[in-house]
């Protein structure tokens, strides 16, 4: 859970009654489908908060592929009921705190992934709205050196990169190949592996125009997947991190006894798959690296997209060509 720097008494709540309106602007859909199901409402209900939650006035949000897959109905068996306000990633300001909230207070600038489990009952009232309700434990204070738009692009992707590296047992001195190094998750996995974990060697794949970017993020080796098949190269790695869906090829380049983390697509032994768990303490752990600039958020240069451009932002994300994060700001 996030710790606040000031010393307000515990359980002190709320903004003045009346500061928070009953309704808000929000993007929502009431049926699954393509981008055309997304509608901008002027009068969506502002969510109530539970005792362990805060209400966040959203300043910026970001899209993840899971937002598009969820909207398409891919997870309907475990989704929350429609209508859905999409969005996992948020950065904004606390305007109200539940009775059990201890570490956050009104006015705190926070960021986080608002749904603890991405696929099992994700929040019905998401971050593509003026307000969203979030458990304190899923949030962290926003690094002061980052703007809201930059911070909004981090949570789900950096939590995924971190959890994947942890589950793979990654540690200093090990080598890693990251498939999809220029995407939201991959761009952070490169930086964490190199600058937080102390990898001996980081290799990553992308198309030709993105190779310099991979190097600037900390990759020692940038592999152009339009010119070379990584599985045909002689190098083997302690860990392969697959953010593309190339599980069958990924296992061919892992060392004996190594780990293959798969985020999407086929899983071939020894590869394994996991679904990210949101956790504010991971963001807190990484905050010093973000504060110092050792780890940098990468906001796709086509953005940030205006709040009115959410449909366009989804369709851009769904090209699968985004560089870093598709951010919506200001909200
Ligand atoms: P992005 O949309 O950010 O990824 C886009 C990037 O993928 C582009 O920069 C593109 O680079 C790159 N890319 C596409 N094809 C290839 C390829 N063949 N080889 C190398 N790079 C490629 O996605 P995310 O990083 O946010 O997510 C990646 C995947 O992981 C998604 O399927 C997502 O759903 C999944 N995911 C799963 C999670 C889990 O918990 N299991 C959590 C988070 C994400 P270029 O233009 O050069 O091709």
Image (spheres, rainbow, N blue to C red):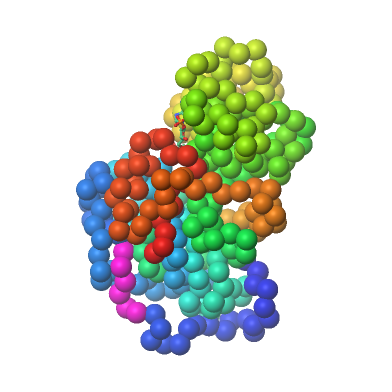
Q: Quadrant of residue 253?
A: top right
- The quadrant of the rendering that contains the C terminus is bottom left
- Residue 275 image offset from top left, x and y in percent: 50, 43
- The quadrant of the rendering that contains the N terminus is bottom right
Which of 101/296 is in front?
296
- Residue 115 image offset from top left, x and y in percent: 46, 56
Residue located 71% across and 44% down the image: 196
Q: Is residue 252 magenta?
A: no
**In this picture, which residue range is highlighted in magenta?**
21-26
Image position of 218 with respect to 145: above or below = above
Q: Quadrant of residue 39?
A: bottom left
For residue 123, say whether it is visible.
no
In-image side of 268 versus 28 (left or right): right
- Residue 41 image offset from top left, x and y in percent: 25, 65
In-image side of 156 versus 82 (left or right): right
Q: Quadrant of residue 217?
A: top right
Image position of 285 with respect to 274: above or below = below
Which of 80/139 is in front?
139
Residue located 66% across and 17% down the image: 235
Residue located 65% across and 12% down the image: 234
Q: Main secondary structure of the magenta part?
A: strand
Which of 209/105 is in front?
209
For residue 302, say whether it is visible.
yes
Image position of 122 with respect to 14: above or below = above
Q: How many marks?
A: 0
Residue located 25% across and 69% down the image: 42
- Residue 220 image offset from top left, x and y in percent: 67, 29
Q: Is residue 24 magenta?
A: yes
């Amino acid at each position: 859970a996030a710790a606040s720097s000031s010393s307000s008494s515990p359980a002190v709540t709320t903004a003045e009654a009346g500061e928070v309106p009953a309704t808000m602007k929000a993007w929502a859909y009431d049926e699954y489908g393509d981008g055309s199901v997304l509608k901008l409402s002027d009068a969506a209900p502002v969510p109530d908060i539970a005792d362990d939650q805060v209400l966040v006035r959203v300043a910026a949000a970001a899209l993840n592929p899971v937002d598009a897959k969820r909207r398409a109905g891919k997870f309907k068996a475990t989704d929350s009921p429609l209508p859905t306000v999409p969005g996992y990633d948020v950065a904004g300001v606390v305007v109200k705190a539940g009775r059990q909230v201890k570490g956050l207070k009104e006015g705190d600038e926070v960021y986080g992934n608002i749904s603890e489990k991405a696929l099992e009952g994700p929040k019905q009232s998401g971050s593509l709205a003026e307000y969203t309700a979030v458990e304190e434990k899923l949030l962290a204070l926003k690094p002061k050196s980052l703007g809201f738009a930059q911070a909004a692009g981090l949570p789900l992707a950096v939590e995924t990169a971190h959890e994947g590296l942890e589950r793979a047992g990654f540690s200093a001195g090990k080598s890693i190949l990251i498939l999809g190094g220029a995407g939201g998750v991959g761009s952070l996995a490169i930086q964490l592996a190199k600058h937080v974990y102390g990898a001996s060697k980081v290799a990553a794949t992308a198309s030709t125009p993105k190779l310099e970017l991979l190097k600037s993020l900390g990759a020692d080796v940038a592999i152009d997947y339009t010119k070379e098949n990584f599985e045909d190269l002689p190098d083997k790695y302690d860990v392969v991190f697959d953010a593309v869906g190339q599980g069958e090829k990924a296992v061919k380049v892992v060392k004996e006894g190594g780990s293959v983390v798969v985020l999407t697509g086929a899983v071939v032994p020894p590869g394994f798959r996991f679904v990210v768990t949101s956790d504010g303490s991971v963001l807190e752990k990484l905050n010093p690296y973000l504060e110092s600039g050792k780890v940098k958020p990468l906001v796709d240069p086509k953005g940030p997209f205006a709040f009115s451009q959410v449909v366009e932002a989804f369709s851009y994300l769904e090209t699968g060509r985004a560089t870093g994060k598709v951010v919506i700001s200001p909200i």
